[in-house]
Image (tube, rainbow, N blue to C red):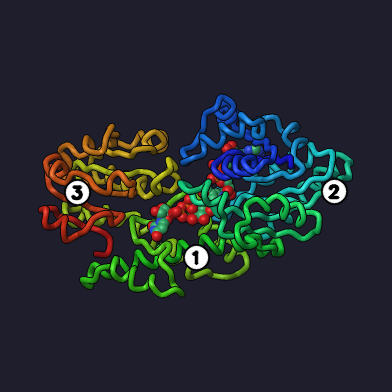
């Protein structure tokens, strides 16, 4: 099949590359000329394990290409994926301007029937808006060309995006006409494993499924964060509680890790957007409002612990931070807890030496001008003369450090661990003031 991907960011690039990998011909479009130039020169604009090799292989095989030429891109694919960003508007609702601009471009340039697939995370009713936008644009041109709009939300996780796309738990397709259903069945046939992974449903249910999944996962995390904070005061160990409840198959182990708050490009904005959708319909969405509030507080939790240890005024204090990305295996800094922590430390007059194995460059771009923030070239160098070490992202390389060397580098042996990397009893035995989350 010939497929066009409109928007070559995390989701568009992974989707396009994985669809090429199974034999399709894919053209990825973007409005960002620098991004397309990087891709055309064999570079990858994001860090995603395994993606670079897969892109190279498919480009070399002639199945994958990149362009900024809208007309050529719309002409190329019988399927047009829309995978542009849907950032939060001021009121928290999803900003659909990029999605509707993509729809308009399809309407402006299509000359034969197309199946348009919403891959972006979009509120219920967006497929209708996309349909209306394309129809209106076709009408402006006096053109009468058949098309259908399908909802096919994406569930990949950054850092494991290829694995998630190639071996999906499920593929949700909201489609209401036979031609589109048949085309989507053929498109996803190579991704079926021992049983059918495609869940066909109506478009609105598919749109809501994506928000429901992310909101449920965010809820679990906020719930565990609150429980962890309570466990600290009650003298319980949240890690044991986590195992104790996770063993119940009705609960399960996934996404029960308390920490420094959830970040990333999806959970924060999708929870906000679902709350906004509820508000528009007159529903208060009380649970999700609380999930969000709890997360905002959790992002400040490590600073709260520092303040408890060193006092409100951190003027003249110097801290080391390990991990800046919103989670390991990505350079994505969107809504990362480290941003809140660094800003709060700067506000209180502290200086910071930060280290991240992959996200440092992106961190420099998004918060490099924060007063007192410096970047270290390696994890141990970050510790020199610091009053404490804060761990914000659980990169594997932080799991088994040389604790003697840490102690020798820090001015005071204080570790505030936002990701529960180490055994508290052992760290205390080694002489650290070790503070984790919920234990
Ligand atoms: P992104 O910001 O990385 O990429 C979006 C790309 O679209 C950008 O490169 C931008 O230049 C391009 N673009 C904007 N308008 C365009 C237009 N009119 N034509 C062509 N290109 C255009 O975003 P992302 O993280 O890939 O997210 C895309 C969508 O997928 C969002 O709705 C997001 O919620 C959803 N999603 C993201 C993830 C994730 O892990 N990042 C996972 C699942 C779903
Ligand atoms: C998420 C969804 O998992 C994915 O299905 C969707 O398509 C996009 O949004 P992603 O944002 O890439 O994926 O990362 P994820 O692994 O879900 O982590 C999100 C945030 O939650 C991170 O900040 C992570 O540190 C935090 N988290 C995750 C926890 O605090 N505890 C957990 O148990 C799991």
Along the polypeptide, which appears first: circle 1 or circle 3? 1
Residue 25 or residue 365, whichever sits in front = 25
Residue of label 2: 146
Q: Which residue is at 15% across, 38% downward? A: 385
The Cα–Cα distance between marks 3 and 2, rounded to whole angstroms, is 65 Å
Residue receiving disc 1: 216
Look at the image and tell me in which quarter the N terminus lies.
Answer: top right
Q: Quadrant of residue 3?
A: top right
Q: Is residue 254 left or right of residue 107?
A: left
Q: Quadrant of residue 244?
A: bottom left
N-terminal-most mark, 2 or 1: 2
Nearest the viewer among 237 and 144 is 237
Q: Earlier in the sequence, mark 3 or mark 2?
A: 2
Disc 3 crowd rating (10 Å Cα; few below 14, some 14-19, many 20+) is few
Q: Which dot, 1 or 3, sits closer to the camera?
A: 1
Q: Quadrant of residue 155?
A: bottom right
Identify which residue is drawn at 35% across, 34% down. Answer: 369
The x and y percentages for residue 377 are 28, 32
Label 2's element? Answer: loop
Q: Specify whether tag 2 is near ligand 1 (CB below 8 Å).
A: no
């Amino acid at each position: 099949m010939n497929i066009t991907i409109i928007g070559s960011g995390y989701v568009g690039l992974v989707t396009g590359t994985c669809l090429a990998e199974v034999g399709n011909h894919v053209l990825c479009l973007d409005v960002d000329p620098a991004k397309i130039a990087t891709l055309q020169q064999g570079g990858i604009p994001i860090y995603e394990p395994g993606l670079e090799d897969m892109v190279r292989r498919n480009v070399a095989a002639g199945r994958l290409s990149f362009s900024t030429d809208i007309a050529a891109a719309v002409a190329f694919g019988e399927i047009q994926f829309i995978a542009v960003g849907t950032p939060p508007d001021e009121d928290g609702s999803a900003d659909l301007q990029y999605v509707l601009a993509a729809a308009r471009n399809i309407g402006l340039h299509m000359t034969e029937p197309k199946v348009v697939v919403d891959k972006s995370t979009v509120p219920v009713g967006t497929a209708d808006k996309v349909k209306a936008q394309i129809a209106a644009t076709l009408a402006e041109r006096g053109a009468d060309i058949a098309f259908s709009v399908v909802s096919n939300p994406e569930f990949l996780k950054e850092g494991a995006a290829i694995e998630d796309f190639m071996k999906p738990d499920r593929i949700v397709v909201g489609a209401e006409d036979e031609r589109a259903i048949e085309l989507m069945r053929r498109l996803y046939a190579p991704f079926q494993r021992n049983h059918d992974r495609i869940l066909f449903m109506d478009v609105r249910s598919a749109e809501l499924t994506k928000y429901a999944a992310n909101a449920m996962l965010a809820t679990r995390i906020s719930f565990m964060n609150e429980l962890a904070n309570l466990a600290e005061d009650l003298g319980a160990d949240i890690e044991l509680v986590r195992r104790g409840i996770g063993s119940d198959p009705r609960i399960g182990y996934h996404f029960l890790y308390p920490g420094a708050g959830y970040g990333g490009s999806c959970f924060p904005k999708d929870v906000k957007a679902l709350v906004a959708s509820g508000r528009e319909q007159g529903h208060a969405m009380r649970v999700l409002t609380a999930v969000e509030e709890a997360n905002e507080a959790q992002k400040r939790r490590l600073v709260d612990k520092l303040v408890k240890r060193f006092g409100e005024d951190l003027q003249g204090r110097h801290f080391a931070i390990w991990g800046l990305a919103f989670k390991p295996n990505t350079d994505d800094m969107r809504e990362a807890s480290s941003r809140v922590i660094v800003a709060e430390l700067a506000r209180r007059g502290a200086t910071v030496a930060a280290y991240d194995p992959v996200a440092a460059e992106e961190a420099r771009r998004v918060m490099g001008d924060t007063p007192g923030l410096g970047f270290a070239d390696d994890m141990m160098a970050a510790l020199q003369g610091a009053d404490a070490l804060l761990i914000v992202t659980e990169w594997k390389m932080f799991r088994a450090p040389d604790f003697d060397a840490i102690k020798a580098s820090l001015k005071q042996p204080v570790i505030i661990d936002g990701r529960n990397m180490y055994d508290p009893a052992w760290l205390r035995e080694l002489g650290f003031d070790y503070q984790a989350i919920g234990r």
